[in-house]
Amino acid sequence: MKDAAMAEVKLRPLELTDLESVHELLSDWSVVRHMLFPLCSRQDSEKFLLDAVVQPETTAWRSIVRGITDSSSVLIGLCGIAILRGSEEGEIWYLVRPDHWGRGLATRAAGQLIDFGFRELCLHRIWACCLPENPASAKVLEKVGMRREGLRRENLKIHGVWKDSVLYAVLADEWQTGAAAARRPVAAEGNKALVLGFVDRLINQKDPSAADDLLAADYVDHGAPRDQPRGPQGVIATYQKVSQALADMTVVTEDVIAEGDRVVTRERAEATHVKLLLGFPPSGQRVAWTAISIYRIAGGRIAERWGLIDIRSLIGQLRPQASLHE
């Protein structure tokens, strides 16, 4: 499944119900042949998944594993960060189902994973290794802004054979302000796709499940009504209440800018005023307004939003107009 269009990528924690998809990946020789992962039996896959979900604290390494999904929400890959406990550096890894190779999914997932490591885990250095015979993986690491640090001779035993590996790394300050930041447009594009996909699904496609799929569990909307609770369910409740008063709502995003973990949008919305809203009785008229939103992305999900709408223009359209004959 090759797709040249911009691929939407989301990272999410694994669940025990992901076993079939996880086993499909870890039991595929074409997926694991360049990895330290063994060719997994079902029992091996079950243990991997259980450790990823439970994250036991008795091991020397802290392993954070995320599932890779696209706009279909189907698990199509895995990625993670391994951190030696007490250390301030971590190693990233990733793998994608073969029928999704060539879509840029690994690059976008790696960019989100690195951003998560520096912003959420406060790491100082993130590194990765790939085999010389796996140039596709090297290209991923270079695209996200990691620098090649050298060749390590026969330091990895892959499926019983000692292999050389190429070391790539990036520092936190490089990721934020240096050369790596100038070479990581894929992370920004992935964040844009995440926000645009959320707005389109929730508003234009009338799909409230977009909130569960794309928002963080503790999502906060700083422009929402004061009684709106945190998280996706609060967004769904407010959306359903507003859409009862403003029917057939559509949104067109006229500008979108991404930098770091922020995405800024300028939107134009339209709807039909069919129920009491802001104290104004239904007019049956089509109304339009503009809005500017700032989103913060963390761990492949939308974590926060700040927003302003042109409320004066909206109220002017909601207010009953005086008759010309009065």
Image (spheres, rainbow, N blue to C red):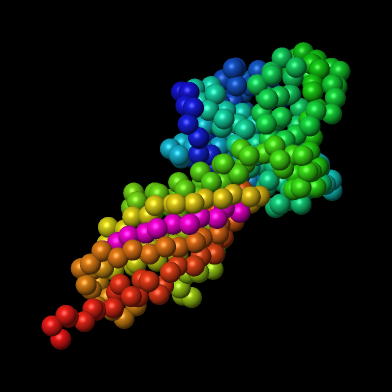
Residue 266 colored magenta? yes
| Quadrant in which residue 211 is drawn | bottom left
Establish if 138 lies above or below 72: above
In the image, taking residue 94 as reference, residue 290 lies left or right, namely left
Does residue 156 appear in this view? no
In the image, taking residue 175 as reference, residue 270 lies left or right, namely left
Q: Nearer the viewer, residue 252 or 36?
A: 252
Q: Position of residue 283 (x, y in %)?
A: 21, 72
Residue 252 colored magenta? no
| Quadrant in which residue 314 is drawn | bottom left
Magenta part of the chain: 262-272
Q: Nearer the viewer, residue 7 or 316?
A: 316
Q: Main secondary structure of the magenta part?
A: strand
Q: Position of residue 102 (x, y in %)?
A: 54, 24
Q: Residue furthest front?
A: 324
Establish if 91 lies above or below 266: above
Q: Position of residue 27 (x, y in %)?
A: 57, 22
